[in-house]
Amino acid sequence: MKKLGIVALLLGTSFAVHAQQNKGFEVGMAVDQQLSVVFEIDDQYRFILGNDGAAFDYIFAQGSFNSPDVPFDWYVGGGAWAEWEDDFGARLPLGINWQFNNRFNLYGQVHPEVNFYGGPELQIGAALGLTYHF
């Protein structure tokens, strides 16, 4: 019961912080689940719908490289993916963002993934995308 209370407190705090930090909405295109449409909310929740399947990533850590010569920011997340036909699994996106003007963002990531269809199998995937910030 004590663990449940701690989890509820952490989730409540997370949602309160999320409600205060409205960073906006982004839409774009990517090569992730083959050619894909990307929806990103508050620089934290990324939804991907593509020709080959769908994926969701929750970005739980972000930062910069602390150098004026490096225009990129980094991120780490956790997510899930599923192909339209059969495969599905979990993934860990490790990526970089480059906001090259105030509306457009280019991102690239590699994501180690576990395919659970037919038994656990370790794989590696990648994505490259461009989003427009509203």
Image (tube, rainbow, N blue to C red):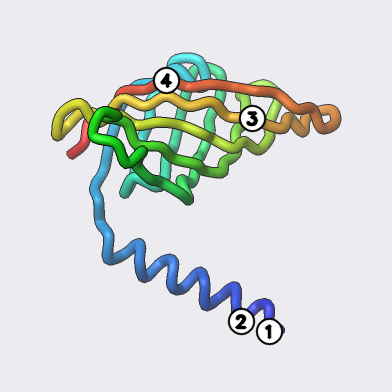
Q: Which residue is mark 1?
A: 2
Which of 65/74 is in front? Answer: 65
Residue 28 versus residue 80 in the image, above or below: above
* Label 4: few (<14), some (14–19) or many (≥20) C-alpha neighbours in 10 Å: some
Mark 3 vs mark 1, foreground winner is 3
Amino acid of disc 2: Gly
> In the picture, residue 35 is in which quadrant?
top left
Mark 3 vs mark 1, CA separation in Å:
33 Å
Alpha carbon distance from label 2 to label 4: 39 Å
Q: Secondary structure at mark 3?
A: strand
Q: Residue at x 46, y 45 (%)?
A: 59
Residue 87 is situated, as x and y percent measured from the top left of the image, at: 70, 26
Please report contact status of discs 2 and 1: CB closer than 8 Å, yes or no.
Answer: yes
Task: Indicate which disc, 3 or 1, sits on the residue closer to the N terminus.
Answer: 1
Residue drawn 31% across the image and 23% down it? 130
Which three-letter amino acid code belongs to the residue tagged 3? Answer: Pro
The mark found on residue 128 in the picture is 4
Query: In the displayed structure, does residue 125 sit left or right of residue 47?
Result: right
Amino acid type, residue under disc 1 in the picture: Lys
Q: In the displayed orientation, state which residue is furthest to the right.
A: 119
Sequence-earlier tag: 2 or 4: 2
Q: Which residue is mark 2?
A: 5
